[in-house]
Image (spheres, coloured by chain):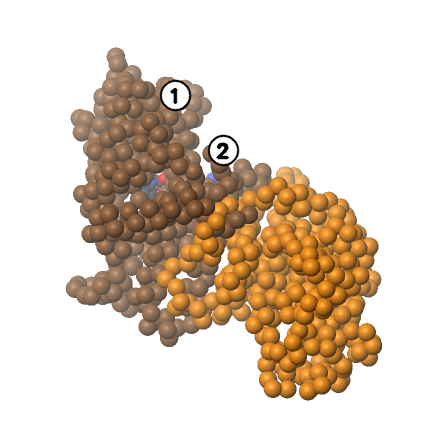
Amino acid sequence: MQLALTEDDQAFREEMRTFFTTTFPEEIRRTVEEGRELTREQIVESQQALNAAGLAVPHWPEEWGGRGWSELKRHIWHEEMQAASVPVPLAFNASMIGPVIAQFGTQEQKEKFLPKTANLDIWWSQGFSEPDAGSDLAGLRTTAVLDGDDWVVNGQKTWTTLGQYGDWIFTLVRTDPEVKKQAGISMLLIDMTSPGVEVRPIELIDGGHEVNEVWFTDVRVPGENLVGEVNSGWTQAKFLLGNERVGVAPVGATKRVLARAKELGASILADDPLLRARVVELENELLALELTALRVAAHSAGAEPHPASSVLKLKGTELQQAVSELVVDLGGPATLASGEGDATLEWYRRSTPTYLNLRKASIYGGSNEIQRQIISRNILGL
Amino acid sequence: MDFTYDDEQTALRDAVRGLVGKAYADYEQRRRATKEDPGFDEKLWTQMAEMGLLGLPFSEDDGGVGAGPVEIGIVCRELGRVLAPEPYLSSVVLAGGLVSAVGTPEQRQELLGALSGGESVLAFAHDEPGHRWSAEAHDVTADASGALTGTKDGVLHGARADVLVVSAVLPDGGTGLFLVTGDALASVERSGYPTFDGGRAARITFDATAATPLGAAAADVTTSIATVQDITRIMAANEALGAMQTQLRATTEYLKSRKQFGVTLNTFQALTFRAADMYTSVELTHSMVDWATMVVAAGDPAQVADAAARAGLQVSRAGRHVGQEAIQLHGGIAMTAEYNVGTFTAHLTALDHLLGDAGHHLRALDARLGDHGVIDPLDRAATA
Ligand SMILES: Cc1cc2nc3c(=O)[nH]c(=O)nc-3n(C[C@H](O)[C@H](O)[C@H](O)COP(=O)(O)OP(=O)(O)OC[C@H]3O[C@@H](n4cnc5c(N)ncnc54)[C@H](O)[C@@H]3O)c2cc1C
């Protein structure tokens, strides 16, 4: 066992740190650091800045912009990005559909979609969940029926994050209602400007508009937009959901928020040993989580992921939520204020909406109960 | 940077597992060993010496093997997996560590040579009634001639020990270390007793007992004691991790085999989820313990202190969680002495209180809270 980074990894870390803190657009980093919401333009600008530097999709196949880095380098890249308040590349593009198209897509699909996906010229939405198909995703009912060369899609998706910005949506649709439910699903790529696609906003408990319902009424989708074989969608879905869980433990970002809480709340903390104790506990748990992420990264040399990787989503979201809760408690009555204020007040004002918003983290991406199910079944064999 | 054993470390682990794991594979053997004084298997202790395990931490000049913290951690972890009662932590890591850190070259050669060879058991007489987890002595004093007076309690293997390393307040203040051996040791009142986890400890009373300074006479060695305690905390964390891994494994097996209501217990999700949470605790602890062990290898005492507190806090929380859940998920059988699950929890509890529990570490970390913005676990080591 060896604690030190190799010279090569150390140099790589410096290189990442330097790029993120000196070259990357400052204004975007400020916005993230202060916990303000990014605009669509800022998210696009951010990913394009990363892509221009070859840092948007390093985990993709090299042919399509990947860098062939070790898991450890990818980990370092990801952590340094968050530590510097750089928004991570849009997950729908970079971690979800991109790798799926690279793995299962036709050559035409790869050429048509991958460069634009990496550069966020296409904004992808994820159309998996339906009102009656959440954790039990295979229960989905949106149908696609072949008519000539086209698929005709009818049904409703829900919880579509940032669907209001979406150019395209990757969906799971039922293409064979007769077989076992996992066996009758296909993956379709749908242009959201197609006639019959309707996006309706859902307002969340933080007052924000982040998710949507997406309705499909006789939407015609060209046959060439099917990914992989007909009725093989469950395979692609599992591949995608596996990737979705990697890197979902936002350790770097959570550490940064906690550090900022310490800084802005210094005078409150000085007088409150109980709050300080919570900070210490959280710092320690985050350290254990970060070390686990490092252990997983340094362990899985390309092959099977280390089993402990299942812990990352579970614990990562719990800590992300716990830190947001601490921030609210630090703010106390200041969280109720509104209107103009200095940076500290503004931060506290945003803290409760953030806390409420982050309740989602343990629900999506495979709820934490589903993670426990994976650990107990697949790892412990229960 | 990696968290994987190299080939030699893997070979060491397998060898230790072969020896200790075999000796205590049957829990009855452990029960037998702990029933009678000295509370461990002297024959196994000799075999551990022959394998070179007792000399691992000490330099070759001192009669040891000169291995690093990762290797010592491996031994502790394997001992923890089977709850081996041999006094490795107290005699080799703690008392031996002090001799190694503070002793004169002659003292080191003599004491550590005998310890490594399995001929001599050392004990650190330090804790005093009414004081918690300190690097200093409080009520036991040394006079100008070096004679010791006062009472130590909770001295692990204090009755069996061939040599006592004793901390005492020096005439001019500060804490010094002394050796009590031979005739002087024979004159000391030592009352040994079994601890709740099958271990042994003793209450030791000194009454103008003749003693030899360990290292330079009248030197205040509080910082050396603190560092050796920190290293021991981290090795105790390795031992605790081994114990937690066994508890998780045992619980998982039990849930798969125990039937109630006509089905095995793993049919009930309320139980499998709790096992998943135990797994999470164990894995997070594993990462932290490996890291802290590597920080010892990097050597800076301030960073070792920080890592010891962090690992200590994590192990305290996780040890209680895993230990308590292991009993609950086993049901009544875990309450019995002949079944090992409860004893593992007892031992985790003993380790928790040996050198400082969560509250103790929390306070230490709280005092340093303002010293950093974010914690960078990799800044503890120079570039390889
Ligand atoms: C803010 C937000 C954004 C989202 N964005 C997207 C998106 O962009 N695209 C998309 O496709 N989906 C998205 N989702 C949907 C998300 O993936 C689902 O909400 C999630 O899969 C859970 O499904 P559900 O909400 O229907 O809850 P349910 O599946 O009904 O679960 C309800 C509760 O029961 C638990 N539960 C369910 N099954 C089990 C079981 N077998 N064992 C134990 N407990 C169980 C759950 O963990 C949960 O606590 C988003 C969700 C949210 C909240």
Q: Horizontal and vertical percent for residue A286? A: 44, 55
Callout 1: residue from which chain?
Answer: A
**Amino acid tagged 2:** Ala
Out of A133 and B314, give the one closest to the viewer: B314
The dot on residue B106 is none
- Residue at 39% over, 27% down: A236
- Residue at 45% over, 71% down: B367
Q: Horizontal and vertical percent for residue B256? A: 63, 40
| Residue labelled with disc 1 | A231
Task: For ligand 1, give the image quadrant.
Answer: top left
In the rendering, what colour is chain B?
orange
| Residue labelled with disc 2 | A303
Image position of A183 (left or right of A212): right
Quadrant of the image containing the C terminus of chain A: top right
- Residue at 27% over, 17% down: A223
Q: Is residue B231 above or below residue A218?
A: below
Callout 2: residue from which chain?
Answer: A
Helix, strand or loop at label 1? It is loop
| Residue B272 in view (yes/no) | no
| Residue A107 in view (yes/no) | yes
Q: Horizontal and vertical percent for residue A155? A: 28, 29
Q: CA distance from mark 2 to mark 1?
A: 28 Å
In the rendering, what colour is chain A?
brown
Q: Horizontal and vertical percent for residue A104? A: 37, 24
Query: Which quarter of the picture shows residue A143?
Result: top left
Disc 2 or 1, which lies upstream in sequence? 1
- Residue at 60% over, 52% down: B70
**Amino acid tagged 1:** Asn
Q: Give the foreground label among 2 and 1.
A: 2
Out of B106 and A194, give the one closest to the viewer: B106
Image position of B155 (left or right of A2): right
Disc 1 Cβ-to-ligand 1 distance below 8 Å:
no
